[in-house]
Image: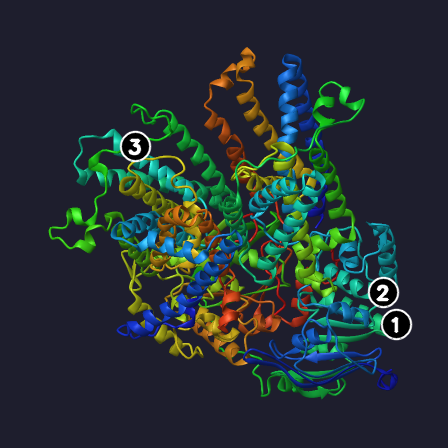
């Protein structure tokens, strides 16, 4: 996954950022962009085969995603937890770990943030929001650390463990939102937690800016936070010693051990940080979008995050556009389903196809006559040991 | 050298010993429990066998793939997709036999797709499996229609005489066909894997592909075939769900069984019989879970406390068990050495 | 004898064979003939193209141009199955045996005998016993391969070829993993085979044994045939010159050692291998500042585990390790490294380097967290770059830039990156494992000089090498390991190849003991 950097050796001259960052970034974007295009074409064929008009469907999807300020806001809202999820996967991938458990970490973060959001009613927003975010992130981090710990000390592969933990988290949140934390408001029969206090709601940019610029007003503050976190993750991975350690473990655990880096410690830390990002994503979604936790609303987020991380070529900054794209599809999907009568699950299919073409980049590269990529992700080295 | 030899011998002597003791204890528990409450024991045990069926079939799918060196975490998706297609074939043809044959073909196709990704396109095999899982969720969700009806599902075949035996009869000899087939297939797969030419080659390819290559075995061909066979086993597990157990299709109805299968495969050290033991353990966890929900009111006093536990916690049981099994056994069991690694000569 | 061979028919011939890999010419216009019953040796350094040529003859690769003739007929060998059918068998340098299979299963794999649908192992066992008797290759058909010694595994490989009725046998570096005595046994087997009409291509870079076994010697250098030699007239020196293309300095120039205080003292060390068997058995030794202790021994006698235990990569099961006055028994790699220990690992691809990282990042692989490369958890890229630029020059790493991925370098230059990194900080102890394996001659000289320079600066040095010549050239004292024990420590001045060879086979007394295998 370091292939981009590998193809464009970093010159010692620091000032020339165009050749050291922009060109490699554009080059790296070719395969993902092509993957999206090919996936959309195949998606169109499937829509046509099932008797609908793909052009109408995609038009409605686009209108629903960016057709109005409200639509853009919805896209940004949808993209926010996806950015966190994508970052969670990216960070884990860098350390050679496949955190399919982002889903479980995220919903636990979401429900805990919702709980903090509704049990306190008299906190100032400046305390309430950070507290709820922190608790959500913490729970995600702890839940992520479990598979990290099991991998480090028993060799249990994180893929199966995190999937099982997803189901367990699902059952746990079902129980909480239908039991002790159920919304007891009159007339409510569904499993959900009560509405969070107003002091816990994440505002839009317009609500806190002293001046008034209309295009900025609708930007959710959570999305801004997501962008800042993406930059931080990029810095952490590439510029800190911890990042160096995580990358080394991910690239070659033997060499890491030789270099005095504890593979066990890094495995746990990476999973913990990955879970923290996912939990934070869940918290932001509860506090900034849904206003409460309701089982099912975040279904599939963990799998979306895989697509996003790989579409971003496992680059933290690349996660932002990738998450925006998936966010657009989700935001526009409802309108598409309503106006073009195309089932919203087509988005899952397109996403799976994107994932396929990004992972099987050899196909796209052959199409474009680009050279073969070196190395790549290797996660499937059997189920045992490190 | 001598130390090593005596060690291996010690291992092979100890294992059946422990196995016999273990089986004896289980048998004893079953008899005691049968004496105290015969109905519940019988219900839980037959539920155990049926619940274990898709899991052992999934594990056999995993064994074929991994023994030849291909990791397959897409079994979940393969099951889901085949469950859906099996149901649809049943809707379209109204013939259960045709539906099963169609499902197996679908499984073979998905297996071929996984082989294409992991062998020819050299996609990371875990990612490849994830593609299948997401694709299956998307496709079955997109094409799912409510309110479809079928002519029915596979019926129980009662084996004369044997089915009249106490406990054993209703548990072992009163089952629908795929449940019988699963038991039969455990034996067949064991024989194929360890007693035939194909099995020897499969294991060689999964352990040391270069060695297989140098004696003229076509590594990637062997892998393709095995992954396709694996797809067919996963498909049978899917067919079990829609054509035998439930009778209709529901979104996401596999509910993690494909992943549990993989854990069971690891628990069973990549052997059919070992995996079957693991599958029965999970079948039991599932059986207890469903029977508790069913029989809540009829629970005898000594089991009444079970009825007090919230459903969601009982529902966690199989997943918790999977994690415990993985954490407890992976470190000590050794999988095929070349599993997950692309083989290329240069 | 010789006369009859030169008249016997040609069974295998290569004409103008050329094979290139991206960026490398592995074979260029290679011509080769092999007669019935002949032992032809291919001599050449690592990377001279010997193995590539054999892989072409065996059908694993296909030549870009040129022809292969088997028994006078031009053939295109499509793969191993094809070459087996044509009677060509190969024993690879890294054995092609499935460790968890039995001997019989390994031998029949790909040519299985069956009874109905089931495997027929009984008739295979019988056939294996027959072959064992015929050629003196004793091995138990039902033993698991992973439980066999290296020498026994090699016998399995040879039976595997004979089982397939091979009469052309290619042996790729067969003695690399054997004691001199085991090699002698192998030569007996080879001579029996040729008497029965089998033709043998023998690949090696060990001059002595080549002179002893061959009927004819062909020397390869940089993918070309640079000469043929008759073993009756050739000398080690003449062969060495052909091999490397210039006068070789087989000895390292160095003054007498000047040992001072003890730097590392190891007492009764016990270490287990991956299968939890004793690999290092109650080993004790000391190394003083300013001396080189060489560890000689056939591979797999505990050297790897010993080094891993001393550098913190493997837990110890007993005993004590004291380095520079600190008790570092069971310490973590970083503690040991902080105590002033440099480690050149045995497997540089696997342990010593991160292939996708730049040379610069690899140069700080174990110092990245220290000043000046990092401050409070933040990397200082400027310092990393400066260090890399300086070390690349100082250690003569041949690269267009210090910022290219280390994977683009040749073996010798990769090794120089590791040497540069380890020697770039003040050391008290240097542990170098196989420091010149797979490295070109120029780099070998440079690396040897660097190691001796460390010694002369007062560093205690431990050199582990499978090459007896290297151990003898570098060491002041030589410890010989056999089955996990140090069977003897010999001053370098008193060490001869013969004496070390006997020690490597576990024979410590004058009268030879039966070697358990």
Name which residue lies at 67% across and 13% down: B35
Query: In the drawing, what numbered circle is on residue C135?
Result: 2
Same-chain check, marks 3 and 2: no
Closer-to-camera residue (C100/C491): C100
Tell me, yes or no, whether the two marked residues, 2 and 1, touch with CB atoms within 8 Å: yes
Q: Circle 1 sits in a helix, a strand or a loop, which is it?
A: loop
Q: Circle 3 sits in a helix, a strand or a loop, which is it?
A: helix
Residue C55 spot, x, y in % from top left: 69, 73
Q: CA distance from mark 3 to mark 2?
A: 80 Å
Residue A127 spot, x, y in % from top left: 19, 38
Closer-to-camera residue (C239/C473): C239
Residue placed under numbered mark 3 in the picture: A115
Upstream in the sequence, badge 2 or badge 1? 2
Q: CA distance from mark 1 to mark 3?
A: 85 Å
Residue B179 located left or right of residue C117: left
Name which residue lies at 29% across and 64% down: C380
Residue placed under numbered mark 1 in the picture: C196
Residue A296 spot, x, y in % from top left: 41, 37
Same-chain check, marks 1 and 3: no
Q: Chain of mark 3?
A: A
Q: Among all residues in the image, which is located at the extreme left?
A: A210
Q: Which is more foreground, mark 3 or mark 2?
A: 3
Q: Among all residues in the image, which is located at the extreme top?
A: B301
Q: Is residue C360 above or below residue A82?
A: below
């Amino acid at each position: 996954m370091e292939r981009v950097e590998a193809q464009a050796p970093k010159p010692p001259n620091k000032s020339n950022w165009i050749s050291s960052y922009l060109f490699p970034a554009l080059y790296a974007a070719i395969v993902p962009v092509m993957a999206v295009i090919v996936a959309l074409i195949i998606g169109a064929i499937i829509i046509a085969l099932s008797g609908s008009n793909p052009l109408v469907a995609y038009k409605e999807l686009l209108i629903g995603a960016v057709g109005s300020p409200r639509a853009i806001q919805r896209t940004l809202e949808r993209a926010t937890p996806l950015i966190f999820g994508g970052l969670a996967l990216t960070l884990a991938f860098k350390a050679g770990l496949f955190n399919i458990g982002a889903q479980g970490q995220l919903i636990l973060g979401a429900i805990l943030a919702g709980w903090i959001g509704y049990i306190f009613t008299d906190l100032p927003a400046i305390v309430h929001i950070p507290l709820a975010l922190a608790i959500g992130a913490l729970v995600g981090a702890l839940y992520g650390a479990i598979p990290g710990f099991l991998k480090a000390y028993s060799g249990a592969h994180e893929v199966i463990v995190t999937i099982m933990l997803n189901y367990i988290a699902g059952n746990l949140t079902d129980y909480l939102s239908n039991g002790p934390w159920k919304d007891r408001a009159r007339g409510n029969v569904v499993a959900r937690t009560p509405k969070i206090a107003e002091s816990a709601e994440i505002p839009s940019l317009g609500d806190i800016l002293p001046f008034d610029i209309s295009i900025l007003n609708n930007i959710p503050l959570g999305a801004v936070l997501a962008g800042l976190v993406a930059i931080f993750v990029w810095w952490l991975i590439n510029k800190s010693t911890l990042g160096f350690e995580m990358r080394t473990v991910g690239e070659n655990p033997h060499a890491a051990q030789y270099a005095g880096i504890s593979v066990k410690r890094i495995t746990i830390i990476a999973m913990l940080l990955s879970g923290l990002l996912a939990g934070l994503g869940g918290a932001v979604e509860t506090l900034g979008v849904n206003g409460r936790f309701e089982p099912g609303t975040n279904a599939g987020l963990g799998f979306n995050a895989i697509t996003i991380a790989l579409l971003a070529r496992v680059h933290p900054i690349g996660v932002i556009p990738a998450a925006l794209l998936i966010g657009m599809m989700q935001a526009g999907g409802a309108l598409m389903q309503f106006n073009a009568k195309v089932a919203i699950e087509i988005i899952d299919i397109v996403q799976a196809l994107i994932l396929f073409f990004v992972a099987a980049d050899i196909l796209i590269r052959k199409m474009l006559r680009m050279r073969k990529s070196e190395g790549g992700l290797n996660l499937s080295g059997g189920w045992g040991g490190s | 050298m001598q130390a090593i030899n005596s060690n291996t011998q010690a291992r092979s002597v100890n294992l059946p010993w422990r196995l016999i003791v273990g089986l004896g204890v289980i048998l004893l528990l079953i008899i005691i429990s049968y004496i105290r409450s015969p109905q519940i024991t019988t219900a839980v045990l037959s539920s155990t066998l049926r619940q274990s069926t898709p899991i052992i079939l999934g594990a056999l799918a995993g064994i074929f793939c991994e023994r030849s060196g291909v990791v397959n975490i897409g079994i979940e998706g393969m099951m889901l997709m085949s469950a859906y297609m099996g149901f649809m074939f049943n809707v379209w043809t109204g013939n259960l036999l045709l539906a099963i044959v169609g499902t197996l073909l679908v499984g073979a196709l998905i297996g071929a797709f996984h082989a294409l990704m992991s062998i020819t396109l050299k996609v990371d095999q875990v990612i490849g499996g994830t593609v299948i899982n997401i694709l299956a969720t998307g496709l079955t969700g997109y094409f799912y229609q409510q309110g479809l009806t079928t002519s029915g599902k596979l019926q129980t075949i009662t084996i004369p005489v044997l089915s009249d035996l106490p406990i054993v009869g209703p548990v072992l000899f009163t089952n629908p066909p795929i449940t019988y087939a699963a038991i039969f297939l455990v034996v067949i797969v064991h024989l194929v894997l360890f007693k035939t030419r194909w099995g020897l080659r499969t294991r060689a390819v999964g352990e040391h592909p270069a060695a297989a290559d140098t004696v003229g075995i076509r590594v990637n061909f062997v892998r393709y075939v095995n992954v396709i066979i694996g797809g067919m086993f996963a498909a049978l597990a899917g067919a079990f769900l829609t054509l035998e157990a439930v009778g209709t299709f529901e979104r996401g109805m596999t509910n993690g069984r494909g992943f549990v299968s993989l854990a069971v495969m690891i628990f069973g050290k990549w052997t059919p019989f070992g995996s079957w033991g693991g599958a029965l353990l999970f079948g039991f966890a599932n059986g207890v879970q469903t029977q508790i929900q069913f029989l809540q009111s009829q629970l005898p006093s000594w089991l009444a406390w079970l009825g007090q536990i919230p459903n969601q916690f009982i529902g966690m049981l199989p997943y918790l068990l999977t994690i415990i099994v993985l954490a407890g056994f992976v470190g000590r069991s050794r999988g095929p050495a070349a599993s997950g690694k692309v083989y290329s000569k240069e | 004898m010789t006369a009859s061979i030169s008249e016997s028919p040609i069974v295998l011939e290569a004409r103008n064979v050329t094979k290139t890999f991206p960026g490398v010419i592995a074979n260029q216009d290679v011509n080769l003939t092999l007669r019935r019953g002949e032992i032809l040796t291919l001599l050449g350094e690592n990377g001279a193209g010997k193995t590539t040529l054999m892989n072409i003859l065996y059908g694993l690769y296909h030549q870009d141009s040129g022809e292969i003739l088997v028994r006078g007929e031009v053939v295109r060998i499509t793969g191993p199955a094809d070459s087996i059918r044509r009677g060509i068998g190969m024993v690879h340098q890294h054995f092609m045996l499935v460790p968890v299979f039995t001997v019989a299963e390994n031998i029949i794999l790909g040519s299985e005998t069956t009874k109905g649908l089931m495997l027929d192992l009984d008739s295979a066992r019988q056939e294996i016993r027959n072959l064992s008797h015929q050629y003196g290759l004793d091995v138990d058909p039902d033993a698991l391969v992973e439980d066999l010694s290296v020498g026994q595994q090699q016998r399995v490989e040879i039976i595997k070829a004979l089982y397939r009725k091979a009469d052309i046998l290619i042996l790729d570096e067969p003695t690399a993993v054997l004691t001199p005595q085991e090699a002698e046994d192998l030569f007996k087997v080879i001579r029996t085979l040729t008497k029965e009409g089998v033709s043998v291509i023998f690949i090696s870079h060990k001059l002595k044994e080549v002179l002893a076994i061959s009927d004819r010697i062909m020397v390869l250098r940089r993918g070309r045939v640079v000469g043929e030699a008759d073993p009756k007239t050739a000398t080690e020196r003449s062969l060495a010159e052909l091999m490397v293309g210039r006068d070789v300095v087989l000895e390292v120039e160095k003054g007498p050692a000047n040992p001072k205080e003890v730097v590392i003292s190891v007492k009764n060390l016990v270490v287990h291998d991956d299968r939890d068997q004793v690999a290092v058995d109650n080993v004790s030794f000391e190394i003083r500042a300013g001396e080189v202790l060489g560890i000689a021994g056939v591979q797999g006698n505990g050297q790897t585990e010993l080094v891993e235990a001393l550098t913190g990569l493997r837990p110890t099961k007993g005993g004590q390790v004291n380095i520079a006055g600190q008790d570092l028994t069971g310490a973590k790699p970083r503690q040991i490294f902080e105590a002033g220990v440099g480690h050149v690992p045995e497997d540089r691809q696997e342990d010593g380097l991160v292939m996708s990282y730049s040379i610069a990042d690899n140069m700080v692989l174990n110092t990245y967290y220290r000043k000046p490369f990092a401050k409070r958890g933040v990397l200082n890229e400027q310092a990393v770059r400066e260090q890399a630029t300086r070390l690349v020059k100082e250690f003569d790493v041949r690269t267009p830039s210090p910022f290219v991925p280390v994977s683009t370098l040749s073996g010798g230059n990769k090794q120089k990156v590791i040497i540069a990194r380890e020697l770039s900080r003040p050391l008290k102890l240097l542990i170098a494992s196989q420091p010149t394996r797979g490295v070109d001659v120029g780099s070998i000289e440079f690396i040897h000089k660097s190691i001796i320079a460390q010694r002369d600066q007062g560093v205690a040095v431990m050199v582990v090498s499978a090459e007896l010549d290297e151990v003898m050239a570098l060491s002041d004292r030589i410890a010989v390991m056999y089955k996990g024990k140090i069977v003897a420590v010999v001053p370098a001045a008193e060490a001869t190849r013969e004496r070390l060879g006997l020690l490597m086979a576990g024979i410590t007394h004058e009268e030879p003991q039966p070697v358990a295998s």
